[in-house]
Image (spheres, rainbow, N blue to C red):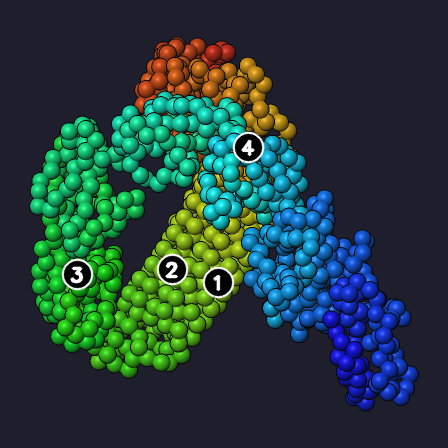
Amino acid sequence: MITKFERKVIAGLTAFLMCLSMVLAVPVSVNAEAEQTQDEAVSGAKQEETVSDVQMQDETVNDAQQDVTTGEEVEEGAAGDIQKLPGMSAESTDAMLNTTSQEDVIGSITLKKDGTEESGSIMLQEDQTSVRYQLNVEEDGQYYITATGDNYWSTYASITEETEDGTQDVEIINSRVELRKAGTYYLELSDYSSESQKIIKWKAGKVKDITPGEFDIELNEEKPEAYYRLTVDESGVYYVRSVKGMSVKIRDTQTGNEILSSSSFYKLKKENVYEITLGRYSWENASGKWGILKGIEKEVECDKVYINETDGVYYKFVPKTTGYYSVEGGFYDEEWNQIYSEEMLAGNAYYLAPYGRYWCIKQSEYTPIDPGGSGGKVQVKVGETYTHDMRKGGFYEFIPEETASYHFRSNENVKLEVKERIFEINGIGTLEGKVDYSVVMRAGSVYWIHLYEMDAATVTWTIEKTKTKTAVTGTKYTAVKGGSDTYDFVPSKSGDYSVSFNGKGGVLVYDDAWNEIKKYYPEEADGSRVVLSLEQGKTYHFAVAALEKDMQWEIESAKTKNGFVYTNLADNTVEILKYTGTESNVTIPDKIDNKVVKTLGAESFTENETVVGVTIPAQVTNLQYGAFASCTNLKKVTFAQGSQLKKIKEETFEHCQKLEEIHIPDSVTQIEKGAFYYCRSLSKLTLGKKLEVIDNNAFEGCSSLKQIEIPDSVESIGEGAFTYCTSLEHVTIGNKLAYVAKSAFSWCNLTEITWGDGIAKIGDSAFACNQKLTTVSIPDTVTELEYKAFAGCVELSDIEIPDSVEAIGGYAFEKWDIYNEGGDTAWYDAQADGDVYAGKVYYKYKGTIAEGGTVNLKAGTKGIAGYAFLDQINLTGIEIPDSVTNIGDYAFVGCEKLNKVTVPASVTKIGEKALGYLTSGKGGQAYKLEGFTIRGVAGSAAEKYAKENEFNFEAYTPEYIRGDVDADRKVSIGDVRMTLRSICKKAELNGTQKLAADVEKDGTVDIKDLRKILRYVCGKIEYL
């Protein structure tokens, strides 16, 4: 409440400011209606007082006096707008207020007992941080209050209550607050950001009390959340039936904790109250009926395939033997807390809600080895020898008594895996073959030792504490191929030391407590080195291993000159190991100590925050691993004219966030993995004329690149080479590139692709999620599109696929996961339900096949795409013409009623689990369809697939053999001759002969068929 005296002071100050504004011609806006509103809100009655004590001498001042009254003479404009504030009248909810008041109450909001939601928005000026409303509550209960703004972290709502003891803060938890009808409450909306204009949007209403049942829900941008309070009349397991696009959070008010579940099932108690908050995934609305219902329990066994057919069913599993088990979706204990890689005890009950339609419980390969069959474990001891039986599988458990490096060895070829429970740990040495491997393990921790894929039925192995040797500077040591050795080194002085290698291998460096301080894996066969800063008198452990052959290594004290830490190499040149100078623009010297600088060593400038520009002289031939990685202020790199640089090594410039431009010298033939990874400011890139290889992720995340031209010299682009170049609009692909690798240009902003002449295959996700790409014309040199090649290109409506394309991977033009990541292409959206073809390939059955349905593929079809009939549970028959050459991965997975398939001899490739399998979902576990039979020609790909997958096979004799024109049951030079005579009009073929001669299955016998038969007879191709 503002007193009479305070109002007089305000009036006087107002008059003074108005006069001052007239003198200085500075407009001053005074909005006093907000004060009126405050008094109305607090007292419930209009104040009629006027301020008469302040004398004003002209009409303008009288107007100012009128503004500060609380009467009803409010002029049109800003002050008048206040009458339309949210909460001040029934029709005022969506108005927006411009106000300069921070502390005064500007209106009231009534929270209705019927649950009607109130909402509004308010604009704060730059000097404002908050506004206040009075809250009127119609009924005791729980309410929700939300406030959102442009700046998520600086916008929030708070509530205070006026009591006899003063002003008290009211606790808001997860946007919920308990309010009483008799309470006096104030809502403060705040935004502490520095924006000139700040808009706060708010919503408030009563939380709905519910019991188990089904309810309507409509979530969208205007209403992104819904709030409920749940009680149940019976303790037990309950199931949340969700709506597409809806998220669910459940909080137990008794414990105050959110109930976490990766399934839709929750253990609820009768005596507790649960808060349910429904939200939506940001990319879509949620509409329909949701529910919370009592779950249905069924008991299941290990190694049996089950089908999820009914919502709300969960499963109980009681293991017969103690061990580790796995299932899609995981296991839960009695309280429905998820179990992560824990031993499951025989006789105990565990619960599960598996993913997908089909699922099966399997005993994990990580079940501990039980030597006596009574539930015990082999507790490994240092120094003892163990014999492992491959047929029994399982893992060994090891708990070290002290923290140290431990050494594993085996007498036969085997693969070794060492985990700290579920987390794999890394050491050094040989893990595959005859094991010779060192790894640091911590005292008291539990480690799993797993041996698998042995050449022999049994293998003998040991674990010992690593025996260390002593290393000194200036001495060369030999690391034997396949082995690992550990050395202790005590520096005689503090400083930088160079560790050099003359081959491929690895080194792990630990301090005296066996904490890892450096990991380095030299890849250069002709030598490399790394620099370490070490302290005098401390003990350091060096674990060293050689990969391809015996390797020499050496520790040397490094030299320093003009800020460059360096070492002299055997060829009388210099390698710079580290830069310690303070210059912002660095020129690498041509020589140091009269010796030519040819190498910038591994991590030599890594994480330098001073260097802005660097000039690299022409004679430098090597930029080693991570040389300039994370130089956060590096803007410009200049390679001197005539540069002799051959490679830009792995991660050389990664995370150089301000690097704007790079011209790769013509001498460079390879850009290695991650060389320019997430150089976000790199907007101009010129690739050299002799460049042959761009490795994996070389330019990933270069989000300022708008176009790139791949020169004709480039023969290989690695996986993810340009992924997440989110500004990249145009790419030109050179003529030597035959394969666009996995995710090479995914998540870019491409609108145009210019193809080279040599493209033969477009890889997995190669152009996925280019959401502005509208048109693609696949060159007629391309024979295959792999999995997800253009998935997520949502605007792609015009796709030209030539007849040369014979194979297409699954989801090449669709979204591929339950979260709609990617999205369908406009082309696929436009296809009618039923058979969808992409060129000569059967792409998909869109929609659901009717009960008992069959599909006949068109004559001339060349391939069946991956996942073409995924989960078509009603399909009972498929007719595959003899023009089909390939069946994609998982093409018929989940077709549970398709018990037999005839595969023609023309099919030369059958993908992974293409026929005869059920699945838990895309990418999930697959299970064999019991009794499945493949019918095919003896010796064909069909018979091979049946044998490899242990399915029934029925052989049949075809009417003709492809290419066997003379019908002698074999393809030979005689068939070439007869086909040639037919083409030259020297002989006429009958109907069956024409079918045999038309190996291209295009309806005609021509020179293409002749060429293919001849190549087969000459052994140039394996199949016709």
Query: Which secondary structure lies at badge 3?
Result: strand
Question: Where residue 984 sits in the image (x, y, percent)?
Answer: 48, 21
Task: Look at mark 4 in the image and give the residue it sits on.
Answer: 233
Task: Look at mark 2 in the image and give the residue it sits on.
Answer: 675
Marked residue nearer the N-terminal end (1 or 2): 2
Residue at image x 29%, y 36%?
Answer: 343
Residue contact at pointers 2 and 4, CB within 8 angstroms: no
Marked residue nearer the N-terminal end (1 or 4): 4
How far is mark 2 from mark 4, CA to CA? 62 Å
Q: Is residue 454 left or right of residue 279?
A: left
Extreme residue toward the right, this view? 59
Question: Where residue 653 sits in the image (x, y, percent)?
Answer: 39, 64
Q: Nearer the viewer, mark 3 or mark 2?
A: 3
How far is mark 1 from mark 2, CA to CA? 13 Å
Question: Where residue 344 sits in the image (x, y, percent)?
Answer: 30, 33
Determine whether 212 is above or below 169 in the image. Answer: above
